[in-house]
Amino acid sequence: MKKTDAPILKYSAKGRSRKIEDFLLRPPVEKGADEIARKVLEDIRKKGDSAVLKYARQFDRAPSTMTELQVSKAEMTAAKKAVDADFKKAAKEAHKRIAQFAVAGLREDWRMPAPQGGWLGEKFVPLDRIGAYIPGGTAPLASTALMTLTLAQVAGVPELVACTPADSEGKVNPYILYALDLAGATEIYKVGGIQAIGAMAYGTKSIGKVQKIVGPGGPYVTAAKRLVYGEVALDMVAGPSEIAVLADESANPVHVAADLLSQAEHGTGSEKALLVTPSEKLAKEVRLELDAQAKQLPRKKPVAKVLARGCILTVVADIEKGIELCNRFAPEHMEVITKRAEAVAKKIDRAGAIFIGPWTPEAVGDFAAGPSHVLPTGGTAAFFSGLTVEDFRRRVSLIHFTKGDLEETVSIVEAFGRVETLDAHARSATFRL
């Protein structure tokens, strides 16, 4: 059986492999994407609908008028009829699980007493209008519709906008439309790529501006999201998918290889797959399995690209060294398939999501478990977190002082007002007393 191109490398305290270091330092945004995204966004900012249409025709092969860009009730009705019963059942169950997890994550308004009879607290208010980008090109990600808008639905956001590219006939995948409807989308537009981000961020005559944009996308969508930050809020800057698997000799090489390939098939060719193990025997067995299983997949070309340049199998001295390497990688998806997996997982603190034990493949996180699959990539899991229901609400601080509370703190206000040369600040307190 032919071996795959994925190298087996050693990682130890004696000296770090250059290949491993280069693998860890992947950029969240691909080189060159910013420049193209900036030009398209500026055109949309200035020209609105006409620019959106121009790029939709160029890149999405979409309809010729803005009216046709919005999914109609008739199109939604047709989509519902086209979707098979098995998928409807699966989507409803996934939606239920995602909603249950989101409800459990909602924070409640709270108060605490101030020392002299007043009180302090926080309240949580849903955003008014959000936008979700749903990829629909190489892979129609119906699951992303559920993993984004369901959270906004639970948070109580009244206006849920979705943008997703159409096919060559100007139609959106019916499974995406069904999932969007299930998740509560109030407006759906047949727009993809940079032009979708620009339309939602700046607003046009036909597509109203949103307050926040969420959802994954390719390199140009990622670049566009980063460039509109400040015009709107963002979930995160999420690039190509990635997975790390920390496994010992107890792991099944068939399962490990299947999990690594689950992210390699996404289609950009820039995905990353990392195996970390103290067992060289397991690494060799996984490499053989990668080749055997890759031959059976329909997406052979993108998978081959990832195995050639985006997959490494790393042998470490022990599990502790493996934990160190995984935390340095800070992966989007982190699987722990070891003895005492829960104890090992507690030491992983840089990951978008951790999948613990031999019965938790990453795919359950993508489709069924409950937490959103919109997760940080490119090493940004070291400082970003995955999408949650609270990303769709504003946190508002509440302060209610009595005269006694003001008397107790006025000296603090005066001191900072003096040091910062902000006399009016201090007077606003002292004049009351």
Image (tube, grey):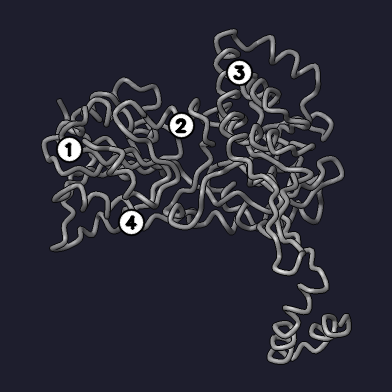
Q: Residue at x 37, y 31 (%)?
A: 301
Q: Could you tell me residue 362's position as x and y percent?
A: 39, 32
Q: Amino acid at mark 1?
A: Ala
Quadrant of the image containing the N terminus: top left
Instruction: In the rendered structure, find residue 283 and report the number of the disc placed on it.
Output: 1
Kind of residue at disc 2: Gly
Q: Amino acid at mark 3?
A: Lys
Q: Is residue 223 above or below residue 301?
A: below
Question: Of residues 237 and 400, which is closer to you in this image?
Answer: 400
- Alpha carbon distance from label 2 to label 1: 24 Å
Q: CA distance from mark 2 to mark 3?
A: 16 Å
User: In which quarter of the view is residue 302 placed?
Assistant: top left
Within-10-Å neighbours for mark 2: few <14, some 14–19, many 20+: some
User: Gap between marks 4 and 1, in whole Å?
Assistant: 20 Å
User: Where is mark 4, residue-wise?
Assistant: 328
Residue bearing the label numbered 2:
365
Q: Do callouts 2 and 1 mark residues in contact (Cβ within 8 Å)?
A: no
Residue drawn where x is 67% and y is 27% of the image? 183
**CA distance separating discs 3 and 4:** 37 Å
Q: Relative to residue 331, is residue 416 drawn left or right?
A: right
370 above or below 232?
above
Mark 3 Cα within 10 Å, few/some/many (few <14, many 20+)?
A: some
Label 1 Cα crowd, 10 Å radius (few <14 / some 14-19 / many 20+) = many
